[in-house]
Amino acid sequence: RQEAYAAVKNLPAVTRDGVEIALNINAGLLIDVPQLAVTGAAGIGLYRTEIPFMVAHEFPDTHRQAEIYRKALDAAEGKPVVFRTLDIGSDKVLPYWQRAEEENPAMGWRAIRIALDRPALLRQQLRALLLAADGRDLRIMFPMVTEVAEFDACRALLDLELQRAGERQVRLPASLQVGAMVEVPALLWQLDELLKRVDFISVGSNDLKQFIYAADRSTPSVNDRYDLLSPAMVRLLGQIAEASLATGTSLSLCGEMAGDPVGAMALMCLGYRNLSMTPPSVGPMRVMIRSLHLGQLCEYWARLVGLPGTAVRNALEHFARDREI
Ligand code: PEP
Ligand code: MG
C-alpha cells in the first residue's frame, strides 16, 4: 500500500468532479519535515513549536530557536510552513519548567495565556521566527485564543518585534500571514470580530471537541464517547466554514479529524478545502479524494444532517464502501 501511495504522491488531491483539497502535514521536529517530499504534501499546516522545547534540556534561547525554525524553512524548500507559537501547559510539559499543580491543566495556564503573562517568552519566539525567515514568507498562528483581545495583544507583540527587526536591519519577511487556532468554544461567538483581524484560521478539532463535549481528550473512558460527526460538532464546524467563506478568510482544520477519511468527507461537504494531518494519513487521503465524486457525496450528505450519535459516521462509511472509495 505504501508503494501505491508513493506512486500517486505527485498527483493533485482532486475529486472526480474537480474539487481540489490542499493536503498538509502536521510537524514538530526537524525529522518530520522531509515527510513533505515523501508524501507530496502541499505544506506544513501546523508546526507545533513546543515539541523541540519538550525534548530540550533547557529553554532554547533566541539563537537556538532561530536555528530550529531556519532549518525547518530550509527543509520545506519553499513549501508553506505555519508556525504555531508555543502551546505548552496541559499535556505538553517542559521538564525544566516549574509550574503550579492544576486540577484541570487543559483549561489551565497554557499556550498564549502563558505567553501574555510572560510576554518576553513570546517576543523571544517571534524574534527568532523573524530571524529564521530572513526575507522569506512567514506564517504565524496563535493557539488557544479565547478572546479577540488576546489575539490583538499577541499581534501587538509581533508588531513590536517587526519594528525592532526593522531597526536592526533584519530582512523582514517577504510576506507575513498571521492566524489563530479556533479551539476554544468562546471564540465561536466572536468569529465576526476575529475574522476582521486574521489572515487565516485553523480549527483545532482535538481541543475544540474536548471543550464542546466537556470530555477530556486524554481520558479513555470519555474521549471517544461523543462522535465528531454528531449534530453539535457538525453544526458548529459548518458555521465556522460559512463565516470564513463569507469573509474570504483562509480556513483549515489541523486536528486529528483531518486525517480520518470519514471525518474529511464530512469536512469537504461542509466547505473545508485545506486539511492538515499526520504524514501517514496523506497517502490514503489523496487516494480517497481522487476516487470521490464530491457532488454525489454532498447530495447524500444533505440527508444526513442532524442524525444523532454515530449515525452520520456509519452512513458515510456505507457510502464509501458501496462506491469502493
Ligand atoms: C487541536 O487541538 O486540535 C490541535 C491541532 O492542537 P493540539 O493537538 O496540539 O492541541
Ligand atoms: Mg490544541
Image (tube, rainbow, N blue to C red):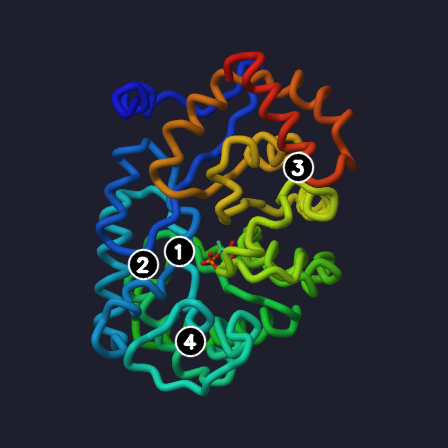
Disc 4: which residue: 122
Residue 37 place in picture, x, y as percent: 26, 35
Query: Which dot marks residue 133?
Result: 2
Mark 2 or 3: in front is 3
Q: Is residue 4 left or right of residue 290?
A: left
Q: Is residue 201 left or right of residue 50?
A: right
Q: Would you say the residues marked 1 and 2 are in contact, meaning their CB atoms lie under 8 Å apart?
A: yes
Does residue 200 appear anywhere in the picture?
Answer: no
Name which quarter of the figure residue 208 lies in. bottom right
Q: Would you say the residues marked 4 and 2 are in contact, meaning their CB atoms lie under 8 Å apart?
A: no
Query: Which residue is at a point 44% across and 73% down the rendered structure image?
Result: 89
Q: Would you say the residues marked 1 and 4 are in contact, meaning their CB atoms lie under 8 Å apart?
A: no
SS class, disc 2 = helix
Name which quarter of the figure residue 5 lies in. top left
Query: Which residue is at a point 48% across and 46% down the rendered structure image?
Result: 256
Earlier sequence position, callout 3 versus callout 4: 4
Disc 1: which residue: 138
Earlier sequence position, callout 1 versus callout 4: 4
Q: Is residue 228 left or right of residue 93?
A: right
Could you give the CA–CA distance between mark 1 and mark 2, rounded to whole angstroms? 6 Å
SS class, disc 3 = loop
- Tell me the amino acid under the disc marked 4: Leu
**Dot 1 surroundings within 10 Å: few (below 14), some, or many (20 or more)?**
many
Up/down of 116 relative to 23, above or below: below
- Tell me the amino acid under the disc marked 2: Ala
